[in-house]
Image (spheres, rainbow, N blue to C red):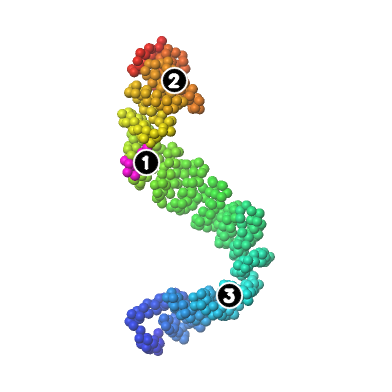
Amino acid sequence: MDEAQHSRHNQTCHCRSVSPKWLIKLSLIWSGVLVFLASAFVNAEELEDYAQIYVDQYFPPPVAGLSESAENKAEALAHFTVGRMQENKDRTEEAIASYLRVLELQPDQLDLARKCAYLLASRAGKQSKARELLESTLERNPGIPFPYVMLSEFLSTYHSNNQDNKDRALDLAQQAVDQFPGDPMTYEHLAKMYLLGKRKDEAKTLLMSSLSRENSDAQFWIRLGKVASRIWPVRAGTDSSEESLEVLNQFYSRATEHAAGDIEVNERAADYYAATEQFDKAEKLYKQLVDQMTDRLDLRKKLARVYKEKGDLKEYTETLLGIVEVNPGDVLTHRQIAAAYREQGDIPNSVKHERLALKIGKGTAKDYLKVAKAMVTENLHEEAVKFINEAAYLFPESPDFPWLLTYPLRNLSRFKEAAKAFEDCEKIAIKHQPALLDERFYFNFATTVERDRDFDRAAKLFKKTIELIGKQNPEKEDKVFEAQVYNYLGYMWLENDMNVDEAGELIKTAIDLDPDSAAISDSLGWFYFKKGRYEEAKKELLRSEILLEEEGGDPDAVILDHIAQTFYALGEKDKAIDYMQRAVKLDPEKKEYSERLAQYQNGVPFAPSKTAEGAKPGA
């Protein structure tokens, strides 16, 4: 700033009696404007000095500083900055004045002209002034299509009640098309005018006429294709959609024909083909795009969706796998891969990606349960135990995890650990989910403890189960389950020579509840055997064999063994050997069966059970 300018500036400030507080604000604003201007003119070789701008004044640079055009631009930027500040403070009139000064200096700033017209018409209520501005903008920029569109748009919006203005708006739109046929904006605007006026046929004629033009600009065709899609909507499965596709495809095929590797055009065309279920065309374009832009994972996702829509699960999965290879932290894609593998029946890989998704993005207890159940269902027992224990640690108040843990542990014959899981589940469920502790919970608990050979504790749990059945199922609607519980407790005692008579009563109760059960019939027959009542045992055990066949079940080695022992007790050695051989064939790993067969073949005398009363050894 030279000495004269300093003097003039100081006089101005003193005359206005600016307060010290406002001087600080003024200084801050000035600093911001100066930085803004400096960023706008970074060519230091040409511009060694800049115009100096204050909120209320503009001081031109020294004579040798800027060219006339650069000076105009600098001043225009200053007024624009002031206008923005005034607008932000709702000083609309002042903002408009600043913007109009910008347009005087830079008449080609069409977006600003449009904005200024909006402020005049909508916020200042000066529609005639707004129109004058846009008319002036058109006069000063006759070789550009946008001023035609702006004025036409303004007239159709703010003067739609006046037919002359409506006609002028449409005429301007048509002039823009006639004078600038290579600019898609002109077609877009005129088509919109036709559609707003419910003149759809004329809009169709307009777009169809564009197809007769020679234009190698791919953007021209892609933009017209978007306009055309509003005029020829596609509704799947209708005849009109087939006709619409024939028309629309002409625009998009022209676009891709002239795209020459233009990623934006090809992507928009591919999106159109995917949206209109032309998946082969979409696939071709997306594959090209993926090859061009290997880092664009969104393109791979679009390609994956196309494969999914085509029903190509293999390619869908492979494409998704490619995405997580690049971005292993993509939780959603891991879940999509898991779902794809699940649909293909590949549960281990499905579980793998579900677990990765949970590891990366965490999840709810429900998410963990879903994975855990899949692992248990697919007999991935070792993995399930580890995973469920992790989930139980994360969700200590959920009894579902220790409850679910019992399944893989029992399948792995780790009964002591399974019993501990039942205990943990019971403690948590009492407080948080008491409804879980029903008769079936305690039945499974009991069978687990029985497998751990803690028979006394198992008996207590079976009795608790029976007690709950009485309370929760007084009408005994689920007789089959109730019979199963009575039978299980009775057979456990019977096998271990415990409470044999009481066991027999339990089994008889069970047979009354479910008289056609092969398993319960076998238990009753075995009870008779234990009591030395071999004829009754034979009758019931053979009935069990028949019932099993009627149920459609495979032969059971335990039933065959029981029948063999009964025949041998009755002295029917050949039949005993025959049944024993069948039992060995079904379960060759069971050493007890093989040893018993050898005894029968060698004629070892029959030794009755300790519990048998009045038993007579066979011949």
Quarter of image, res 477: top left
For residue 540, the mark is 2
| Residue occupying the point 56% across, 55% down | 286
Magenta residue check for 46 = no
Q: CA distance from mark 3 to mark 1?
A: 70 Å
Return the residue found at the far front.
475
Q: CA distance from mark 1 to mark 2?
A: 39 Å
Instruction: Please tell me whether mark 3 sits on a helix, a strand or a loop.
Output: loop
The magenta span reads 427-439
Q: Residues within 10 Å of mark 3 (few under 14, many from 20)?
A: some
For residue 520, the mark is none
| Residue occupying the point 37% across, 86% down | 16
Amino acid marked by disc 1: Ala
* Labels 3 and 1 touching (C-beta < 8 A): no
For residue 159, the mark is 3
Quarter of image, res 616: top left
Q: Position of residue 533 (x, y in %)?
A: 39, 16
Magenta: main secondary structure equals: helix
Magenta residue check for 433 = yes
Q: Position of residue 556 (x, y in %)?
A: 45, 25
Q: Which residue is mark 1?
A: 435
Q: Position of residue 195 (x, y in %)?
A: 62, 66
Q: Nearer the viewer, residue 411 or 478?
A: 478
Q: Is residue 70 among what the camera can see?
A: no
| Residue occupying the point 42% across, 15% down | 535
Q: Relative to 267, is 520 on the left or the right? A: left
Which numbered disc, 1 or 2, marks the residue that appears first in the sequence? 1
